[in-house]
């Protein structure tokens, strides 16, 4: 179960306004009273940051990432602990309160992320916290002194905001997966892997060390007939590349674990977002610049969908020089001095490990994707065995070579002329086991043996494990 708050709910706006009001009142109070550096950081900047972050999350991201409000709630707990410490209370009482705040954070996180049901408990947690604050401040509340009321208002506003936010929480009932702790912006974490699959990424840390290579060949006589048929239908630039990409989409529809990736020693699934990457020459000459394209495909895509998306992407980068997002980003990096460039790459690797790379960089990166295809046939050479990149999370690299003919003897003694294409597969074995890969490659052969099935969407799309 996952939960959200909607901006269409008045209670959400009340919660956000109370948080903003708490921050404003706190700033006003300390502007009037003054504060030393220690008070400024612990009793002003920390709770103001927590209040504003909470308000931003519920208003801007509460529909999909409400669970992230656990971060400002943790900051609030640290603030209340620091407030007690600065008041000079006994160590035993301070430790007891710190344990209570820690339990509050843990339960809030588990409840809002759906690990524990009955999210209504959040309301009673904030209600209890408000009651405790009222009891602890009873002397100040009964003093009838405005200055004491003014000092307490920010804390009460903060806790009341949590009360209203708890009343606004609703469960997602659309049946779709919604992100939670441990997920990345480009994939959800696969949490039901076997123990062996969890241990292996910590032993084989680098992607190159976890690579398995497969060399194969494909008889393409029927595929070439299929290509000619599509060209007669009006798909003028249709070729084997379109067939191979469409067949990979069909492969993921049957074997969804192929659309996983590994990052930070954990396995993630891209779901139905198949990110296809490919290097493209702007012109067929040795001095022509290279660029990369990235297509977002679906397991339900037909060969016509693939043809349209692929040709649109290729034409876009070929017709306008240095226009792709990859080119523009790469050019910015080339402006950096060598040492700074090296540090930037290290920083990006570190951010990638924790899933913190910004989405726009993931979108332009050819090192983050589902599969990389390269066609050596257009260059007139056999398929190469390409390496996987240690940077990024690309788990599959497939290369196709040029076509060649071979004379074969049939069972009746006649000589048959057949046409073949070499294929090479480089696979990260940590995303699924060898039996799964073998089954998938056998199914790929069956799909390519009857390419007309690519004209229509698959009858069924399998879902990956949780």
Image (cartoon, rainbow, N blue to C red):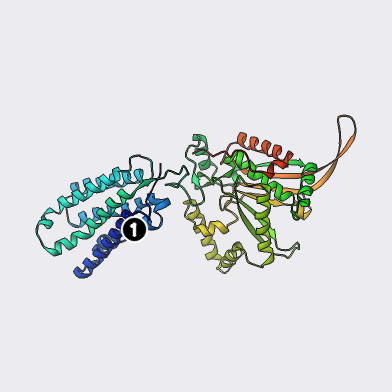
Q: Position of residue 46 (x, y in %)?
A: 29, 60
**Residue 425 appears in view:** no
Q: Residue at x 73, y 48 (%)?
A: 400
Left or right of 139, for residue 413: right
Image label count: 1
Residue 262 drawn above or below residue 197 = below
Left or right of 132, for residue 366: right
Left or right of 33, for residue 143: left
Under tag 1, what secondary structure?
A: helix
Q: Which of the 4 image quarters holds residue 211?
A: top right
Residue 409 drawn above or below residue 32 = above
Q: Residue at x 68, y 61 (%)?
A: 315
Left or right of 88, for residue 75: right
* Residue placed under numbered mark 1 in the picture: 55
Residue at the far left in the pictured view: 143
Residue at the far right in the pictured view: 414
Q: Residue at x 10, y 56 (%)?
A: 142
Residue at the far top in the pictured view: 412
């Amino acid at each position: 179960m996952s939960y959200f708050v909607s901006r269409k709910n008045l209670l959400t706006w009340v919660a956000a306004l109370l948080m903003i009001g708490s921050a404003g009142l706190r700033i006003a109070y300390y502007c009037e009273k003054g504060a030393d550096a220690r008070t400024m950081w612990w009793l002003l900047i920390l709770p103001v940051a927590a209040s504003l972050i909470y308000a931003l999350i519920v208003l801007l991201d509460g529909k999909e990432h409400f669970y992230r409000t656990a971060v400002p709630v943790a900051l609030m707990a640290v603030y209340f602990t620091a407030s007690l410490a600065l008041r000079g209370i006994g160590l035993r009482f301070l430790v007891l309160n710190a344990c209570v705040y820690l339990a509050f954070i843990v339960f809030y996180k588990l409840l809002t992320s759906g690990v524990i049901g009955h999210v209504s408990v959040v309301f009673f947690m904030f209600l209890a916290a408000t009651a405790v604050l009222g009891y602890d401040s009873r002397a100040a509340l009964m003093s009838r002194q405005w200055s004491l009321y003014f000092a307490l208002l920010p804390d009460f506003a903060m806790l009341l905001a949590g009360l209203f936010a708890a009343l606004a929480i609703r469960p997602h009932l659309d049946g779709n997966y919604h992100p939670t702790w441990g997920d990345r912006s480009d994939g959800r974490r696969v949490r039901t892997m076997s123990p062996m699959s969890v241990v292996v990424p910590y032993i084989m840390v680098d992607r190159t060390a976890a690579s398995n290579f497969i060399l194969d060949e494909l008889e393409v006589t029927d595929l070439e007939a299929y290509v000619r048929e599509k060209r007669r239908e009006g798909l003028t630039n249709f070729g084997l590349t379109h067939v191979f990409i469409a067949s990979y989409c069909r492969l993921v529809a049957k074997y969804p674990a192929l659309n996983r990736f590994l990052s930070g020693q954990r396995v993630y699934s891209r779901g139905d977002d198949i990110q296809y990457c490919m290097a493209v020459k702007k012109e067929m000459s040795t001095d022509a610049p290279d660029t990369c394209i990235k297509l977002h495909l679906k397991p339900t895509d037909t060969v016509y969908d693939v043809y349209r998306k692929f040709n649109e992407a290729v034409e876009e980068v070929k017709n306008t020089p240095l226009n792709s997002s990859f080119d523009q980003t790469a050019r910015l990096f080339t402006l950096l001095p060598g040492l700074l460039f090296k540090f930037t790459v290290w920083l990006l690797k570190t951010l990638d490990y924790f899933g913190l790379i910004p989405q726009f960089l993931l979108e332009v990166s050819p090192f983050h994707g589902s599969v990389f295809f390269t066609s050596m046939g257009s260059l007139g050479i056999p398929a190469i065995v390409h390496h996987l990149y240690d940077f990024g999370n690309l788990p599959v690299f497939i290369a196709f070579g040029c076509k060649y003919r071979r004379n074969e003897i049939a069972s009746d003694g006649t000589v048959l002329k057949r046409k073949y294409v070499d294929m090479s597969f480089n696979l990260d074995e940590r995303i699924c086991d060898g039996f799964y890969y073998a089954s998938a490659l056998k199914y790929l052969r069956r799909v390519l043996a009857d390419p007309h099935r690519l004209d229509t969407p698959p009858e069924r799309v399998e879902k990956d494990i949780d």
